[in-house]
Amino acid sequence: MSNLLQIETSFLNLPQIKTALNLQEIRSVQRTIQNGQKKKFEQTLSLSKLVLGAVNWFASEEGQRVCAEEGIVWNNEAIGLKVFGWQKSFFYKVMKAGKLDEVVVSTFKAKCDEAEAQGEEPNRSLEGLLKFAKNVHVEGGGSGEGEGGEGESEMGDPETIGVEVRVPTIFTMTYKPEGGVNVSIRVDANGVVKTNNEGVQIDEAIAFLKLIMANNGIV
């Protein structure tokens, strides 16, 4: 321990004390725990990059087109929950980590290694990294949280991470006729209609809906 007095260090190094306190076994377990934390942290960093790529795909032209064709309307919070099974708070932490400058991440890991070498227990975790990133700036004056100098105020806004802010949808319909062309139509609160189908295909979908409603006694 870095805060030990010389007399305390000598005491703990006495063979009988090491045996009485099981220090060898304890140190071994501590190293195992530290190595496990390092591995988990590295896996979390890799995960954050993969998740960021996935969310960026949803925001892409291709992703938006496929979602529209399949009648899928998800915001960021829905993506985090429905795709990854995460609550909003953890999902956005992972997203923030994925946007951090590599210099910030490397510096954080180096400081954790230094602390461990001194016998301390650093907070080598997603929370520890993000807390560290708030207080650092990469070369050139940018913030540690993300590229392009994005600060906490921007990164903290759930709807600005990955997927652009969307106007709420007030109507959506999907029709998948056997052997026919899939129909997907969406109308937002501004009255903007989004569809890749032609009018005649949409008419067929509406006609099918009316027929089903009539057969079920819905006027």
Image (spheres, rainbow, N blue to C red):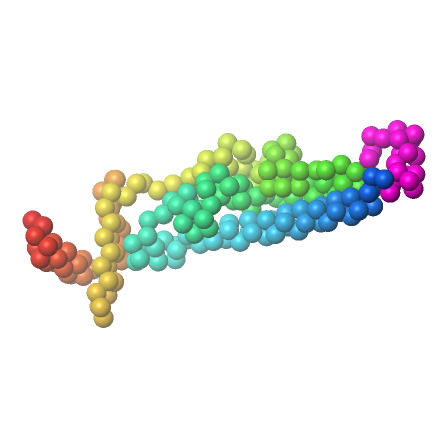
Q: Look at 51% across and 41% down and name the residue there.
A: 90
- The residue closer to the viewer here, 125 or 199, is 125
Residue in view at x 23 percent, y 70 percent: 179
The residue at 24%/56% (across/down) is 174
Up-down: is 7 above or below 104? above
Quadrant of the image occupied by residue 149: top right
Left or right of 103? Residue 189 is: left
Q: How many labels does the image show?
A: 0
Quadrant of the rendered image containing residue 108: top right
For residue 156, side relative to residue 13 (left or right):
left
Residue 6 rendering spot, x and y as whole percentages: 91, 31
Where residue 65 appears, as percent x and y from the top left, is 34, 56
| Relative side of 158 to 32, left or right | left
Task: Say if residue 38 shows up in the picture.
Answer: no
The dominant secondary structure in magenta is: helix
Q: Which residue lies furthest to the front in this view?
A: 20
Residue at x 74%, y 44% (from the top left corner): 30
Residue 4 sits inside the magenta stretch: yes
Q: Is residue 149 magenta?
A: no
Return the residue found at the far bottom: 179
Whether residue 195 is visible: yes
Asked whether 12 or 210 is in front, the reply is 12
Quadrant, the N terminus: top right
Q: Point out residue 40 in the picture as x, y percentages from the top left corner.
A: 63, 49
Left or right: where does residue 152 sit relative to residue 120? left
- Picture coordinates of residue 23, whole percent (x, y): 82, 42
Q: Which of 97 and 139 is in front in this view?
A: 97
Q: Give the residues drawn in magenta, as a range.
A: 1-19
